[in-house]
Amino acid sequence: MMTTSYDPGVLEGLADSLYRQAKSIERSYAVLGFVAGAIIGAVTTTATHGGRFQVNQDLLVSAVTVGFIVCGLAYAVAVSRALALRVQAQQILCQVAIEGHLSELVKRGAPSGAPTPATGS
């Protein structure tokens, strides 16, 4: 039977992963938002010109303008989601720090007058 032991490195690795996901979300949403907006801009411009797809200045201006607008909206959503991931990572790192401080106190012995932890019984 295998026993598992506490390994703070696992939690720290999870926190690092959450930070990487947060950064990736911001970039991905911005790029995908611009591409989706550009497609929407091109399609709406094509529809307003009798359904003929013709690359011209109106099409490019519309595609880029709508692309940047949707990019900004997507990025705003991404920042919110990324913040939630960063907060989660910070909570994990805080828990690791608390455990480290508590285990150090236990190794040194509790100071006199300090409350003793409750036991499960």
Image (cartoon, rainbow, N blue to C red):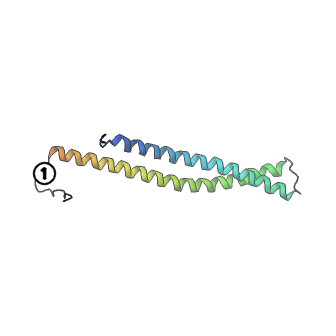
Q: Quadrant of residue 24?
A: top right
Up the image or down, 116 lies above or below 12; here it is below
Q: Quadrant of the N terminus?
A: top left
Point out the image quarter for the C terminus: bottom left
From the top left corner, tell me how far across and down residue 74 is, in percent: 62, 54
| Count of residue discs | 1
Extreme residue toward the left, this view: 112
Kindly identify the residue that appears in the image at 33 percent across and 42 percent down. Answer: 8
Residue drawn at point x = 43 percent, y = 53 percent: 87
Between 108 and 14, the residue placed more toward the observer is 14
Q: Amino acid at mark 1?
A: Pro
Quarter of image, res 47 = bottom right
Tag 1, which secondary structure? loop
Q: Position of residue 45 (x, y in %)?
A: 81, 55
| Along the viewing direction, whichever of 71 and 7 lies nearer the viewer | 7
State the image coordinates of residue 54 (x, y, percent, origin top left).
87, 48
Q: Which residue is mark 1?
A: 111
